[in-house]
Image: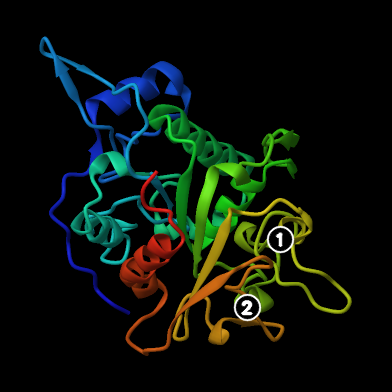
Amino acid sequence: MNQPSQPSFQRGFSKDFKAFLDQNYRLWGFHRPDIISGCYGQLKYIFISGAETRPTQKPSRIPIIFIHGNSDVAVGDGSYGIYMTGFSSQIEYFLSQGYEKQDLYATTWGDADSNTASLNYHSENYLKYNRAFVEAVLQYTKSPYVNIISHSMGVTLARKVIKGGNARDELGSGRYDLGDPLTSNVKVFVGLAGANQGLSSCYTSGSTLPTCGMTNGFYPGQPPYVGKSSFLEELDSNSAKEGKYIVTGRANYDEIIGGNNLVWGKYTTRMKNENEEIVFSSATVGHFGLRDEAGPQIYTILKKQGAINQ
């Protein structure tokens, strides 16, 4: 596994973005004061008589929203573990390419505790939380589009966030509706190291752990007798696409997904409607290295797809 460098950029939300969230999305608590380096994002200030106000026009670049993986931190600085750094490396890369803090957004959707990773699943709370954050960024930036970059469990969460529609969580409110698809608002969707066909580790652990659950977990099924989890099945059967252009990413030496990324002979990192795949074949790049080092490849794809500037 790679040990990422520690970026020096300033983390957290701007005062203005936090004020907007407090006014419109206070109950979600996106700024995560309980998590070190738990969020990132702002819009440029305009100073008028000493007051900070938001521009009334959309930003020049299409904003990027980052959705991290299980037990990770949005823009971690290593305080919770050397690999729990979220999208810090990618944000640092995009800043070096001319992006500004106003163009990049992330929040922590979990408890940032690797000890509870097996308890996390595609819950109503996590899905509604991330859906609301995407909607908040769209509303705040006044941008008609965003690009979404996701990693690990963040991939399958983000897919459902965008696809919307009905879902169920017996530990939540039962049946619920995430709303209409957000497909038309997503230029490029990137899913890095996602377990779209389930996790091979759930072969042996079974479906008793929430993360491997047969309803909202990563249970890979026992074909031809038992299918993969209901959540994963419904992701593929839902006809709404994840974005205009869909990219997946795979590290051939992924130590978390394991099994050469194969689940019943299929690459679990691949998605039904993908247009392009990023592959790292070096043994030095694993699950977290893919997250940290894919920035240049993603930037190139965004440029080719006309998904950098508005």
- Which residue extends farthest top? 49
What residue is shown at x 20% (from left), y 26% (from top)? 45
The residue wearing badge 2 is 200
| Closer to us: 26 or 202 | 26
Distance from the alpha carbon under mark 2 to that under mark 1 = 14 Å
Q: Position of residue 41 (x, y in %)?
A: 30, 39
Q: Is residue 162 above or below residue 234?
A: above
Here the colouring is rainbow
| In this rendering, position of residue 44 left or right of residue 294 | left
Quadrant into which the C terminus falls? top left
> Which amino acid type is marked by label 1?
Leu
The residue wearing badge 1 is 232
**Helix, strand or loop at disc 2?**
loop
What residue is shown at x 44% (from left), y 86% (from top)? 253
Q: Position of residue 309 (x, y in %)?
A: 36, 48
Residue 302, by quadrant, is: bottom left
> Which amino acid type is marked by label 2?
Ser
Dot 2 alpha-carbon crowd within 10 angstroms: few under 14, some 14 to 19, many 20 or more: many
Quadrant into which the N terminus falls? bottom left
Q: Is residue 129 above or below residue 72?
A: above
Q: Is residue 69 above or below residue 33?
A: below
Residue 187: mark in rendering? none
| In this rendering, position of residue 255 left or right of residue 195 | left
| Closer to us: 138 or 199 | 138
